[in-house]
Amino acid sequence: MQTDTDVLTAPDFSWRENALCAQAGPEFFFPAPGSSTREAKQLCGACEGRVACLEYAMDHDERFGVWGGLSEKERVRLRRQQGRR
């Protein structure tokens, strides 16, 4: 007999369907080290999927790029504030 913990479910990516990042290239959200993330953050700020994107990045420990409007350093800071490792 299978229980809920025995079944792995795929992450919910439905937020990506209408995400504004789909209209920009990956280099926009994964800039070269030391480059500005300002434009990517502005686009994220206008995106209806921003919260779900950030939750995905936090849950999956995304370490590179702008996700949900936050840079790598900002997500590390948020993770510490939330008591996540």
Image (tube, rainbow, N blue to C red):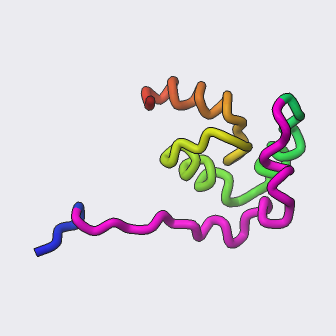
Q: Residue furthest bottom?
A: 1
| Quarter of the image with the N terminus in it | bottom left
Q: Is residue 24 magenta?
A: yes
- Label count reads 0
Residue at (88, 33) in percent of width and height: 35
Q: Is 11 drawn above or below residue 85 in the view shown? A: below
The reply, left or right, for residue 81 in relation to residue 34 is left
The reply, left or right, for residue 8 in relation to residue 78 is left
Query: Where residue 70 sits in the image (x, y, percent)?
Result: 70, 38
The reply, left or right, for residue 79 in relation to residue 10 is right
Q: Is 23 drawn above or below residue 45 in the view shown? A: below
The reply, left or right, for residue 77 in relation to residue 9 is right
Q: Is residue 18 magenta?
A: yes
Query: Where residue 74 sits in the image (x, y, percent)?
Result: 67, 30
| Quarter of the image with the C terminus in it | top left
Q: Residue furthest front?
A: 32
Residue at (88, 34) in percent of width and height: 36
Give the image quarter of residue 8.
bottom left
Q: Is 41 drawn above or below residue 11 in the view shown? A: above
Give the image quarter of residue 38.
top right
Residue at (55, 52) in percent of width and height: 56
Q: Residue furthest left?
A: 1
Residue toward you, 51 or 13 = 13
Residue at (72, 70) in percent of width and height: 18
Give the image quarter of residue 64.
top right
Query: Where residue 66 sits in the image (x, y, percent)?
Result: 73, 43
Span colored in magenta: 6-33
